[in-house]
Amino acid sequence: MTKQELVKKIAKQIGTEIAPTELIVEAFIASVKEQLLKKEAVFLRGFGTFKLKRRAAKPARIIHKNIAIIVPPHFIPAFKPGKEFSKRVKKYVN
């Protein structure tokens, strides 16, 4: 599902126009990004948590140049689903 498809689905569910719904979805995404840039997690009860995960430094290779490099430690955005959401997905998939 693309963002535009999500906007259309939400607009249909709540009975609003697409334009204001798109603004709301964009504001939600911007808010999540802003909190993650501040290194703060976003907890959505019953859904899950958006947070930053720290990746340790690790060796890597640039294959076409045959060079060994060290990838420095860094953060990546991650999503951890809530318990109830995980249970429902497992039940649905199996």
Image (cartoon, rainbow, N blue to C red):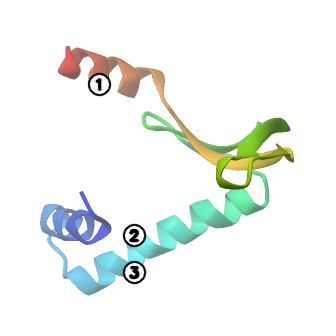
Q: Compared with residue 56, is residue 77 higher up or lower down, i.e. above or below?
A: below
Q: Which of marks 2 and 1 is in front?
A: 1
Q: Compared with residue 39, is residue 79 higher up or lower down, i.e. above or below?
A: above
Q: In this view, does 45 lie to the left or right of 63?
A: left
Q: What residue type is labelled 1?
A: Val
Label 3: state its secondary structure.
helix
Residue 88 visible in image: yes
Rounded to the nearest angstrom, the CA distance separating label 2 from label 3 is 6 Å
Q: Compared with residue 24, is residue 40 higher up or lower down, i.e. above or below?
A: above
Tag 1 or tag 3, which sits nearer the N-term?
3
Tag 1 or tag 2, which sits nearer the N-term?
2
Taking the spot 18% from the left edge, 70% from the top edge, the residue there is 8
* Residue under numbered circle 2: 25
* Residue under numbered circle 1: 89
Q: What residue type is labelled 3?
A: Leu
Task: Say which quarter of the image contains residue 49.
Answer: top right
